[in-house]
Image (cartoon, rainbow, N blue to C red):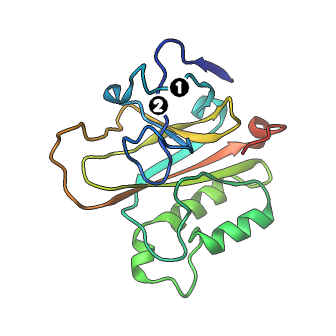
């Protein structure tokens, strides 16, 4: 069941999926913060969104994966949408969503390939589209956990953070260690059918 969410007087600012910061000038909007301290009338654009969750048949897996490095990692700052076998083969090879013989033990520890392959086994590409997003944070004090997806009025697909997610406040002491969070979803094809997702 589709639910229309309209941001009226106070809207939620958008944060790019890759480098998570409090920067208001992010041009890409793939993850939305729900932390109350992030909401201001001055900085938040009014955005209309369709929200989809478990009750709509959407499966979301969101977990801490640590800061990723190397060539075979999902791109930062965007959601990778996989709708057919060609896109699936490219994403598995290019973004480390499938283990290969060349992968190091370190690559296996982050759990991305295993989680993606488990999702793929449970939710067939014949009936579902897949979305993957890697969010990197510059310091400690962050926890990003998504439980839904959204499609906004600009035809952008993103992950909606739940109430367990948090961000450091101005002046908080945080560690300098970078971190990373992986969000993936299996979305019934009927939801995205006919939508020109950008």
Q: Quadrant of residue 168?
A: top left
The residue depicted at 73 percent of the width and 48 percent of the height is 128
What percent of the width, then of the height, locates residue 43?
Answer: 44, 27
Res 4 → quadrant: top right
Q: Which residue appears at 49% of the width and 12% of the height?
A: 9
Residue nearest the observer in this picture, 25 or 162: 25
Side of 22 relative to 189 (left or right): left
Which quarter of the rendering shows the N terminus? top right
Q: Residues within 10 Å of mark 1 (few under 14, many from 20)?
A: some
| Residue 9, above or below 97 | above
In the picture of the structure, the residue carrying the numbered disc 1 is 45
- Horizontal and vertical percent position of residue 147: 49, 38
Image quarter where the C terminus lies is top right
Task: Say the numbered circle drawn on residue 13.
Answer: 2
Residue in front for this viewpoint, 178 or 81: 178
> Which residue sits furthest top?
9
Mark 1 vs 2, N-terminal side: 2
Mark number displayed over residue 148: none
Q: Nearer the viewer, residue 119 or 91?
A: 91
Contact (Cβ within 8 Å) of mark 1 with mark 2: yes
Picture coordinates of residue 27, whole percent (x, y): 55, 43
């Amino acid at each position: 069941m589709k639910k229309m969410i309209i941001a009226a007087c106070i809207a939620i600012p958008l944060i790019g999926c890759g480098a998570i910061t409090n920067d208001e000038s992010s041009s890409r909007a793939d993850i939305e913060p729900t932390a109350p301290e992030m909401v201001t009338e001055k900085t938040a654009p009014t955005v209309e969104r369709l929200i989809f969750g478990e009750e709509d048949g959407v499966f979301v897996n969101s977990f801490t994966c640590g800061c990723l490095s190397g060539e075979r990692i999902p791109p930062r700052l965007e959601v990778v949408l996989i709708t057919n076998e060609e896109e699936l083969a490219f994403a598995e090879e290019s973004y480390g969503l499938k283990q290969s013989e060349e992968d190091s033990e370190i690559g296996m520890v982050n759990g991305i390939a295993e989680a993606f392959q488990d999702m793929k086994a449970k939710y067939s590409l014949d009936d579902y589209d897949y979305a993957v997003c890697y969010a990197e944070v510059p310091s400690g004090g962050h926890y990003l956990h998504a439980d839904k997806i959204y499609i906004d009025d600009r035809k952008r697909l993103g992950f909606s953070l739940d109430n367990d997610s948090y961000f450091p406040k101005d002046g908080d002491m945080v560690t300098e260690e970078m971190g990373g969070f992986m969000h993936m979803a299996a979305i019934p094809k009927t939801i995205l059918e006919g939508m020109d997702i950008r």
